[in-house]
Amino acid sequence: MQKAAPEPKKPAGDADPNADEKPPVAITIFDASGAPVRALRGTNEEGVNRVAWDLRWDPTEQVHLRSTPDGNPHVWEEKRFRGKEARPVIYYGVDERIEGPLVVPGTYTVKLEFEGKEHTTTVEVLKDPNSAGTPEDVAASAQLSYAIYKDIDETARMINQLEWTRRQLDELKKMLEAQKADKSLLSARDELETKVRSVEDQLLQPSLAEEDQKSFRGPLKLYLKLVWLQAEVGTGRADVSGGADFAPTQAEKEVYALLHGQLEQARADFRTLYDATIPAFNEAMRSQGLLRLIPVREVQPRFPR
């Protein structure tokens, strides 16, 4: 009896990219009110596994810069960004994602999900026995740190949507110039870009888009001001030691109130831009047979690394 010839191996290029992909082992942590606090992913390895939770909320939205900065028009030609669609914010002491604040001591629910099955248990988060602060101090710090964290996340989401709009405006300019469009259309595009930038400039200083970590030109805008305030109130960042064990100072409370007020103004300008200004611009483009701008609300991974 002859042995059957083995089937030829498929070239590497023909391999199914999803062949080894397994459904995630999803772990979600909820607070006492049932609100999701943290999403973690298991290892998908057989046997006993351990997943570490650092007792923090999920990281904030990651800022993705997509437009081309005036101060560095060749930024996309740099080796680190060549072939990429987006760039991170690069600044001293700032990571690509801003970690969430520490949770307040208390009882939390942990739910594990895999292939349609669920298992739920509870964990107790205790106050650090080495902390010199009272439970009330720690709770006050966690409360303010969480409020700042939510504002950082909202600011990042607005920046990302504005960056998608600016990216579309960059492409629109190229198309209008290529087809020798009427100057009135180019002027309308330029006017809208100025309005979009005026909103984004409240949130992030333009010099950051140049991706020079050593550049400290111009004052910090809302995003980084909130990041550094959270470092002061929470567990620190870079050379800021933080104060998570102690109640926030009166100065920290007043600074937060000031920054939150600035965020409310930026939010109002943001909504006017997307609820009125851009729809009017889109109608003008439609009347000329041109594509409209799409408000892109970026959805980032459930399990941030």
Image (cartoon, rainbow, N blue to C red):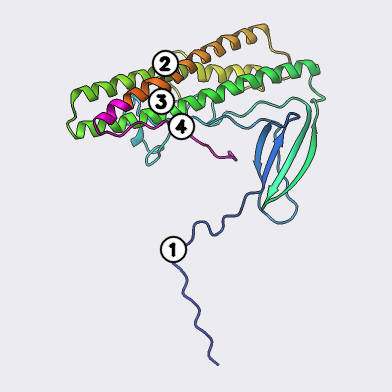
In three-dimensional space, the C-alpha distance between marks 3 and 1, rounded to whole angstroms, equals: 39 Å
Disc 1 residue type? Asp
State the SS at label 4: loop
Lateral position of residue 294 relative to residue 182, left or right? right
> First in sequence: mark 4 or mark 2?
4
Disc 4 residue type? His
> First in sequence: mark 3 or mark 2?
3
Q: Magenta region: which residues?
A: 283-305
Mark 4 vs mark 3: in front: 4
Q: In which quarter of the image is residue 242?
A: top right
Instruction: Give neighbour class at mark 2: few <14, some 14-19, many 20+ (Cα, 10 Å).
Output: few
Q: Return the x and y of residue 231 as percentages of the image width and height.
A: 62, 20
Q: In which quarter of the image is residue 102?
A: top right
Judge by depth and name the residue closer to the eye, 45 or 123: 123
Residue 302 lies within the magenta run: yes
Lateral position of residue 236 relative to residue 73, left or right? right
State the SS at label 3: helix
User: Which residue is under mark 1?
Assistant: 14
Question: Which dot marks residue 216?
Answer: none
Lateral position of residue 207 relative to residue 267, left or right? left
> First in sequence: mark 3 or mark 1?
1
Tell me the residue at 48%/16% (across/down).
268
User: Which residue is under mark 2?
Assistant: 217
State the SS at label 2: loop
Mark 3 vs mark 1: in front: 1
In three-dimensional space, the C-alpha distance between marks 3 and 2, rounded to whole angstroms, equals: 12 Å
Lateral position of residue 117 relative to residue 289, left or right? right
Identify the main secondary structure in magenta: loop
Question: Which dot marks residue 64?
Answer: 4
Residue 289 versus residue 49 in the image, above or below: above
User: Which residue is under mark 3?
Assistant: 209
